[in-house]
Image (spheres, rainbow, N blue to C red):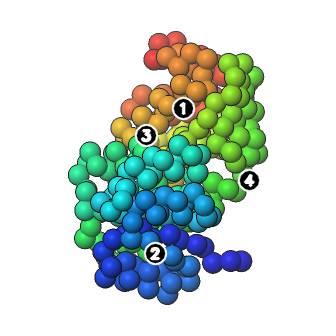
Amino acid sequence: MPEPKILLVEDELSLAEGIKLNLELEGLACTWIPRGDQALKQILAESYDLVILDVMLPGMDGFTICEKVRAARNFTPILFLTAKNTDDDRVHGFETGADDYLGKPFQVRELLLRVRAILRRESWYKSREISSRQPYGNYWVDFDNFCGEGPGGAFQLGVKESMILKLLMERPGQVVSRTDILDKVWGEDAYPTSRTVDNFIVRIRRVMEDDPHHPRWVHTIRSVGYQFDPEGRQRKGEE
């Protein structure tokens, strides 16, 4: 089995050298690029298992890179590594399409744990616990291509939207707590907030429900989490 390929985008030479060395000691292939504009071209041209991306970069900042990568329908996992570490920065990072967010300064051991966790989540997402093309009602969703289609036409899904939906569909009729969603989709050490989960549920409903304000498929279980109803039954009073 080929070793996972990682792209490291970091403009601090000494930090980049240390990260690259430790990744390679873990059996991971690592390519280093110091500029954001160069990194964007590389991500879109090559196939990687993970991108470790600084935010403050010459040429183009990491948030912009992430937005452009996702806009190009490229879903390579992205781990932000940055000194911009306020709650607002982290929420913004996740909402641009990041998979994890690690603030500087950090311990190398923690970075390696985050990297391994992302690679495990990717392995879970690509598993076949349910069909990659999953029907529900008059709709279907394609987890391989992050899209779906229903009576209203085709729709697109983001990475996290697809992961949340896959998790809910793997447990039909079961209540999945926000904590479970955070742990499975982001990882227990990523520290996004429950608000992040709620925001992604809103996005999911916008594309997969006939009436997002009166959902049939993804229901809110107040104060607990969410539930996928395989029968598509509308509930009174749910907004």
Q: Residue at x 56, y 79 (%)?
A: 29
Q: Residue at x 26, y 67 (%)?
A: 104
Q: Amino acid at mark 4?
A: Arg
Per the image, the residue denoted by label 1 is: 204
What's the distance in space between the residues labelled 3 and 2, CA to CA? 32 Å
Disc number lying in front (1 or 2)? 2
Q: Residues within 10 Å of mark 2 (few under 14, many from 20)?
A: some
> Which secondary structure lies at badge 1?
helix
Give 84 or 59, whichever is nearer the viewer. Answer: 59
Q: Residues within 10 Å of mark 1 (few under 14, many from 20)?
A: many
Per the image, the residue denoted by label 4 is: 128
Q: Residues within 10 Å of mark 4 (few under 14, many from 20)?
A: few
Per the image, the residue denoted by label 2 is: 32
Per the image, the residue denoted by label 3 is: 197
Q: Amino acid at mark 3?
A: Val
Image coords of residue 231 (percent x, y): 70, 24
Image coords of residue 14 (percent x, y): 31, 82
Q: How many marks?
A: 4
